[in-house]
Image: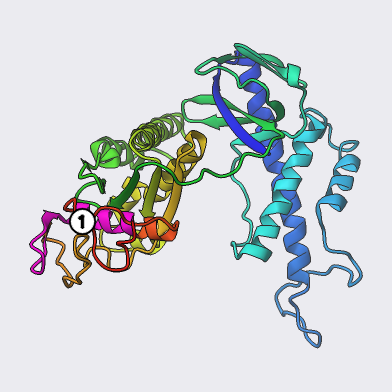
Amino acid sequence: MITVTYQYKLKPNNQQIKTFDQWLDTCQKVWNFALRERKDWVNSRKSPINSCSLRAEYIIPADAPRPNYFSQAKQLTTAKKIYPELTIPHVHVLQQTLRQLEAAFVSMWERGHGFPRFKKKLRSFVYPDVKDKAVEPGRVKLPKIGWVRMRMSRELPKGYTLKQIRVVKRASGYFVMLCYQLIIDIPNPVFSGHPLGVDIGLSKYLATSDGELISRPRFFNKLHGKLKSLQRRLKNKQKGSSNWHRLNQKIARVHQKISDTRTDWQFKLAHHLCDQAGGIFVEDLNLKAWAKGLFGKHTLDAAYGQFFNILSYVCWKRGVYFAKVDKNYSSQICPNCQTHTGKKDLSERIHSCSNCGYITNRDVAAAQVLCQRGLVAVGQPVKEIASGGVLSGVFNNV
């Protein structure tokens, strides 16, 4: 089964914007109330059996079941008779909010995530079940809201079934995310064609085994001065005032511009790499640990984790093989003779092998080593070495 998500910017009128904000506010209250109920139940089970706190204690019957999605969804039906505000949003939207809270607890239990937090505001709501006719070129029909215009930045997918609609509020306006599914199994791409190793770094954004060096665009640094100026002005405003909210919006728009520019550039770079190769091999890095180092700010600005996700998606979409290979000692091995050349300082940007005399850029040499490791991993012989000759030894079997 193939699942794709298409995003479009909405062009709602003033009444529709007011409805969106009202629904988001109601979903936020439902989330916080349900979380409060779950948290009270958990806290009531923390008291020792033979003593109670001298200050305060949660008193909930011992036989009270743990709140879950089904019990809270049932309470939501009863609460609608008491609070008319809950009848305004679509029933599936509120139920989906409770499902997301349940998923947050499951992630905490099974995947080690943190305890779910209370929300100051929610930025999206979901229609989990919609009809195919709800989307037409240039507009989308949202239940209990009606037709909303949208900017057709790309054509709608053909042959897919619409499964879900999500409305998202961002600094630059409202967006709709259309989730489509196609019931068909497509095998993962098989390696064939020209291999390409990719080595990432901070001196250059990446280097390929073909010798191409891509400079690192400094997305955050280019607008850092503007952000600093706006945040300094925000510090002098009264919190909650109109000017404070207005400045917050400006800061949010700058952050969104940085994010959108980075994502667009990474998609273009991924397609550029796929144009050159039939298989791409990247190093398997611990990016979380890397982001906590001395150059953490620059690492986060480069967003290599996001780039690898985008690259793997573009490779799958275009039928290019993608794999991560072992990163260890990739910069300490000569790609020409496989000799261990020793550890290099960061200031040393040229690879020069004393054994075979091969000289090239340090990052390019590491990318060539990654390419050779990738070929071995997929069971392909290494036909050529970095200098263009045939590698002697175990790889010379062609």
Q: Which residues are magenta?
A: 352-372
In the image, is 72 to the left or to the right of 6?
A: right
Q: Quadrant of residue 57?
A: bottom right
Reading the image, the residue beneath label 1 is 365
Q: Closer to the camera, 148 or 185? A: 185
In the image, is 305 to the left or to the right of 120?
A: left
**Colour scheme used in the picture?**
rainbow
Asked whether residue 92 is drawn in magenta, I would say: no
- Position of residue 51 relative to residue 347, above or below, is below
Residue 283 visible, this angle: no
The C terminus appears in which quarter of the rendering? bottom left
Question: Looking at the image, which residue is at 44% across and 58% down?
Answer: 379
**Label 1 CA crowd tier, 10 Å (few <14, some 14–19, many 20+):** many
Question: Looking at the image, which residue is at 91% across and 36% down?
Answer: 81
Tell me residue 210's x, y (percent).
Answer: 24, 44
Tell me residue 270's x, y (percent).
Answer: 38, 37
Q: Quadrant of residue 152?
A: top right
Tell me residue 148's x, y (percent).
Answer: 65, 15
Asked whether residue 355 is drawn in magenta, I would say: yes
- Position of residue 339 relative to residue 373, above or below, is below
Residue 158 visible, this angle: yes
- Position of residue 321 relative to residue 13, above or below, is below
Residue type, mark 1 in image: Ala
Question: Looking at the image, which residue is at 43% across and 46% down?
Answer: 306
Q: Closer to the camera, 382 or 229? A: 382
| SS state under label 1 | helix
Q: Quadrant of residue 234?
A: top left
